[in-house]
Image (spheres, grey):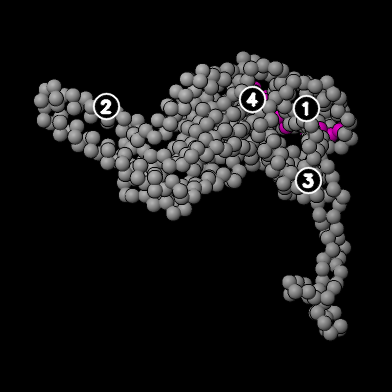
Amino acid sequence: MQRHNIFLQLAKRFLSFYPFTIMGTVLLICTVLLFGDAFINLNPYSFVLAVSAIILLLTAALLSRIQAVNSKELPCEWDSTEALYAGVEDQQHVIYCEGLKILPFFCLHFRLKGRFYVAAKESFLFYREFSTAHAEKLELSLYFPLCGSFQASAYLLIKDIFGLSQARFTNTMRRTLIVRPPLMQWGEESPLLTMNGLEDTIRKKDTSEERYYQREYMAGDKLRDINWKASERLAHLITKVPHITQEKTRILTIFFRNFRNPKRESIESIVHLNVIKGWLLSFIKAVKVAYPDYNFEIITNQDKIIIETGEDIERLSVSLSTLAYHNFNNHSPIPHPGEVFIFSTPFDTQLHRLVADLSQSRIQICRTTAGPAPKTADKQVRDTTFLLLRPLLNSSLPGFWILHREKQLKTVALLQTDSLSVHEKQITTKLL
């Protein structure tokens, strides 16, 4: 075992210093064959071509290595602070290499690889390589179809523009990049449009007249807020400060139903959970922007999360990214006499029980479906086709989980009542 580990370490070290790319290796093999033909058949043309090729390869490799050695002590920084969201193309991360100078006919390359986990055990094998002629700044254009966790490793190297030689000059940079759920644009299907009384609690001014109090002018006050009549009467500047009335903060209760029988993951299970994560996150952001006084109580299978500020929403987006399915629990919810929101998938076969337990509440259900459903006054359905692999063919290789499909996936029927509104997204999953 120890010899095996030593061999692996030597192999990795050799590959890290190996001076040729795949194309350069192919040219090197052809050069050796040309030398053999030149000596066996006394062919001068093969000898000239072989010598020319070996000079080109050695020159490119030597210049790449010299630049890498000279650049080894320069500071290189990978700015990965920009948040990544699923389904968004051309998301930018930046590599800064201060003071790096590259010779003509050479480029800076950034090789990024690792496993992108979209579930507990299911992942993509991710590989991308970026290049630029402007050595001090390299922009990475990233795309991820689903939310999850990307265990990334990367390093910088210098290559010639012909793609023959390479020279690595940085240590491996390792990062865990969290890809957050996809954000959605709210349209007619938004539950915001059917919430009773929500608009009455927004911050507002008094209907009779604008109330305000007065104080002495302070540096930084706006000139338009000066009460000139009072200032003239009192012989010094007086500023009007508006008094804004606001209602008592209200908490919206949300049930996030990531329940599923213990089975092997499929394309449908991963995509449906990805969609309701984004749906929930987008809903909370939309409500918080429109109604800043509203807070949220999110109830999952094992936890209760309180959302009050924008920082809380950002933390929620990170925790949702890696949230997986769980088995059903038998805990009965505490009755909520007000408005209740439920986010669910067709894998939630016990949804009707929760609806029955919340019979005293006005219930808004947001769920994904896998089959056509009739459109009624109380049920709004939106069709979405999810193309999983089209943008990733050149950079990612999924596991065998992508071949596992759900044979039958039916949405649980719910008893329609006046206090129940259902908003559905019909999801069709295709590979290409």
* Residue shown at the point (61%, 33%) measured from the top left: 149
Please name the residue that numbered disc 2 is placed on. Answer: 29
* Residue shown at the point (11%, 27%) measured from the top left: 43
Residue 91 horizontal/vertical position (percent): 54, 43
In 3D space, how far apart are the residues under numbered discs 2 and 4 (Cα atoms)?
Answer: 43 Å
Dividing the picture into quarters, in which one does residue 111 lie? top left
As helix, strand or loop, the secondary structure at mark 2 comes to helix
* 56 on left or right of 377: left
Question: Dot 1, crowdedness within 10 Å: few (<14), some or many (≥20)?
Answer: some
Start-end of magenta stretch: 361-373
Q: Could you tell me if residue 5 is visible in this image?
A: yes
Please name the residue that numbered disc 1 is placed on. Answer: 301
261 or 343: nearer the viewer: 261
Cβ atoms at labels 2 and 4 below 8 Å apart: no
93 or 288: nearer the viewer: 93
Q: Could you tell me if residue 411 is visible in this image?
A: no
Question: Dot 4, crowdedness within 10 Å: few (<14), some or many (≥20)?
Answer: few
- Mark 2 and mark 1 lie on one chain; the one further toward the N terminus is 2
Residue 146 horizontal/vertical position (percent): 59, 32
- Is residue 340 shown in magenta? no
Q: Nearer the viewer, mark 2 or mark 3?
A: 2
